[in-house]
Image: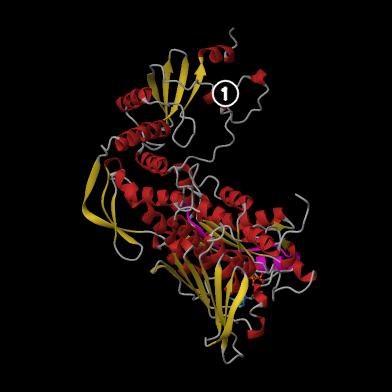
């Protein structure tokens, strides 16, 4: 085929693909536009997973009648005017790509009116081309309605997940902006249901209550800026860190409760997530993550937001300073706000932060640096276990056992988790799940994101022994739970599970549910076991199909072979 310039329509469709990946991207762009328009109220309506309809209504400044069509031209923006402006962007949008991109892959109409105009304007577009324009009454503000998203892009449609998953992505976007802008009243309706409503009173805690629920909100600590921060900031333009963080008591098993906003732009950053985790070092169990809403304010010219079409990544001029400031603010809040002894208690209860573990028996000549060396665990071939003799328990967490070929240290929690995991899956596939009815149904409240996941997975949960039914706004009645979780924190297990199901890959929900039940019902580290209990646990472990790793993939045991022992003691 000869080289030729692509037609305008093809170019628009390609470019749209970068901005509009899924329905949640449309919601994100439209909400950003409403925020840039200084709205104090934003209402979002979604139907059919966002494919059927997305409508965002605001009370912002509106678009003057003469500019409505222009707003849908590619690279048409009112937010920057020159190359210099690109250095200091203080709006969420600036690329002038959202409206044309959305219009290229959906049917769009807009009704908008500015304060100065007596009547507003209506414009509808099809395939990105203006079709109908007329005057229409409206109070100041803008309503954009998007229908039949991706109807003409079957490749995209195919890639989308179930409506429930798309809804949960949408709920997440709106929740994030509700956290970033507590001064704006948000309302989100999905298929006619109220999913989120924030008061818009400027208090972050009130947004947190709506987004994460009361239980989380009660355990949030405010990151206080200190006067000296302001002073040093003025002098050195240090980043200012504000927001709220969760006390260690409400840790989560995923990072989805970490929100970062740079100059109020919602961004994702693995480095920042890592920095926050680090700041909690020693306060959370391994594999747990905190809840945190971190606002970073810094001079506009010290952050480059023009990295990616979706504007979700940024580049800091001085990354280290930013990471350092975030860690310092969190650490200080944790220390100041929680009584000191409590922190120490938590730290010891969860085991002191482990320095890189050095295994005594790492062969010196192997050249492996003296740090944690998981290969020892991997050396154990993935076949069933030999018969083991229990010798005792170490640190209330590990079982010491002797086998024909050496010494075994077995992580009791991981081992039990594996045993239960296989049992739970077996029971489910044979439809022999043991269910415990609750004496009284228990009301169970979830956050908007969890709500979407729960709606999608009721029946799946029932297969594992949960009887859960809707009971009003984001509240459910739980009538029965798996026997394994009776008298355990089944609420925590379900919430954690919903977090891991929301937005993620749904394919392996069976695994996820089984893992979550197993993890919450297994013996904990720190729990003393009798000899009989240890023997029983080892006996069961000998029977499982994969006794060497827990369902999360972590090693269950490490072995010190007789040969290693001899070598360590200098005998050949
Ligand atoms: P960008 O946000 O990058 O400028 P968009 O394509 O999203 O590009 O929007 C184009 C322009 O349309 C904006 O610059 C703004 O002037 C106007 N606009 C879009 N949405 C709204 C809204 N909700 N309220 C007021 N003006 C809007
Ligand atoms: Mg925009």
Asked whether the viewer can see residue 121, the reply is no
| Image quadrant in which the C terminus is located | top right
496 left or right of 85? Answer: left
Q: Is residue 457 above or below residue 384?
A: below
Q: Is residue 471 left or right of residue 259?
A: left
Q: Residue at x 49, y 30 (%)?
A: 555
Q: Is residue 429 or residue 341 the one in the foreground? A: 429
Q: Quadrant of residue 65?
A: bottom right
Q: Nearer the viewer, residue 191 or 476?
A: 191
The one nearer the camera, 158 or 4, is 4
Residue position for label 1: 360
Q: Residue at x 34, y 31 (%)?
A: 529
Q: Is residue 104 above or below residue 109?
A: above
Q: Which residue is pictured at 39% across the width and 20% down the height?
A: 391
Displayed-image quarter of ligand 1:
bottom right
**Count of residue discs:** 1
Seen from the viewer's position, the closer of residues 537 and 254 is: 254
- Answer with left or right where residue 291 lies relative to residue 14: left
Residue 569: horizontal and vertical position, in percent?
A: 57, 13
Res. 235 in view: yes
- Is 493 inside the magenta-drawn segment? no
Dot 1 falls on a residue whose secondary structure is: loop
Residue at the far top: name it.
572
Q: Is residue 242 magenta?
A: yes
Q: Quadrant of residue 531?
A: top left
536 in relation to 459, above or below:
above
Furthest-front residue in view? Answer: 1
Q: Residue furthest bottom?
A: 118
Label 1: how many Cα within 10 Å (few below 14, some 14–19, many 20+):
few
Image coordinates of residue 306 in percent, x first then y, are 71, 61
Residue 25: percent from left, percent from top? 56, 62
What's drawn in magenta, residue-wise?
Answer: 229-249
């Amino acid at each position: 085929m000869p080289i030729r310039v692509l037609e305008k329509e093809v170019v628009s469709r390609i470019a749209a693909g970068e901005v509009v990946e899924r329905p949640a991207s449309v919601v994100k762009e439209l909400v950003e536009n409403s925020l840039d328009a200084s709205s104090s109220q934003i209402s979002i309506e979604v139907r059919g997973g966002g494919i059927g309809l997305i409508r965002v209504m605001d009370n912002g400044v509106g678009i003057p009648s003469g500019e409505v069509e222009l707003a849908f031209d590619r690279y048409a923006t009112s937010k920057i005017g020159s190359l210099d402006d690109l250095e200091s962007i203080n709006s969420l949008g600036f690329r002038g790509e959202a409206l044309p991109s959305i219009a290229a892959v959906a049917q769009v109409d807009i009704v908008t009116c500015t304060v100065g105009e007596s009547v507003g304007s209506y414009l509808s577009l099809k395939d990105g081309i203006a079709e109908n324009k007329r005057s229409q009454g409206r109070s100041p503000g803008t309503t954009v309605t998007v229908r039949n998203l991706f109807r003409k892009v079957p490749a995209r449609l195919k890639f989308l997940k179930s409506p429930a998953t798309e809804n949960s992505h949408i709920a997440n976007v709106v929740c994030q902006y509700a956290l970033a802008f507590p001064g704006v009243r948000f309302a989100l309706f999905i298929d006619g249901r109220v999913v989120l409503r924030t008061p818009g009173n400027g208090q972050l805690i009130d947004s947190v209550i709506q987004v994460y629920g009361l239980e989380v909100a009660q355990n949030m600590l405010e990151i206080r800026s200190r006067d000296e921060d302001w002073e040093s900031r003025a002098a050195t333009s240090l980043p200012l860190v504000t927001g709220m963080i969760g006390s260690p008591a409400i840790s989560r098993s995923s990072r989805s409760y970490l929100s970062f906003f740079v100059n109020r732009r919602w961004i994702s950053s693995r480095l920042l997530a890592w920095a926050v985790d680090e700041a909690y070092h020693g306060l959370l169990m391994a594999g747990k993550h905190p809840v945190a809403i971190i606002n970073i304010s810094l001079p506009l010219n010290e952050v480059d937001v023009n990295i990616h079409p979706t504007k979700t990544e940024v580049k800091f001029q001085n990354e280290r300073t930013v990471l350092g400031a975030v860690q310092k603010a969190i650490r200080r809040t944790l220390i100041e706000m929680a009584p000191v002894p409590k922190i120490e208690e938590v730290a010891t209860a969860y085991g002191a932060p482990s320095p890189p573990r050095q295994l005594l028996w790492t062969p010196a000549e192997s050249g492996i640096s003296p740090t944690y060396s998981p290969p020892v665990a991997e050396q154990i071939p993935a076949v069933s276990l030999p018969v083991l003799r229990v010798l005792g328990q170490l640190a209330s967490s590990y079982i010491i056992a002797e086998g024909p070929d050496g010494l075994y240290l077995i992580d009791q929690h991981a081992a039990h988790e594996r045993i239960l995991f296989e049992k739970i899956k077996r029971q489910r596939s044979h439809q022999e799940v043991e269910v415990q009815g609750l004496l009284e149904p228990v009301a169970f409240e979830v956050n908007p994101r969890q709500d979407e996941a729960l709606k999608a997975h009721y029946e799946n949960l029932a297969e594992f022994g949960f009887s859960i039914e809707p009971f009003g706004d984001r509240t459910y009645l739980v009538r029965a739970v798996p026997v394994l979780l009776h008298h355990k924190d089944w609420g925590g297990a379900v919430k954690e599970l919903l977090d891991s199901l929301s937005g993620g890959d749904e394919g392996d929900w069976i695994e996820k549910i089984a893992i979550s039940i197993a993890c919450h019902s297994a013996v904990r580290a720190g729990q003393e076991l009798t000899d009989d209990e240890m023997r029983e646990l080892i006996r069961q472990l000998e029977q499982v199909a994969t006794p060497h790793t827990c369902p999360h993939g972590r090693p269950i045991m490490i072995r010190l072979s007789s040969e290693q022992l001899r070598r360590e003691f200098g005998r050949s």
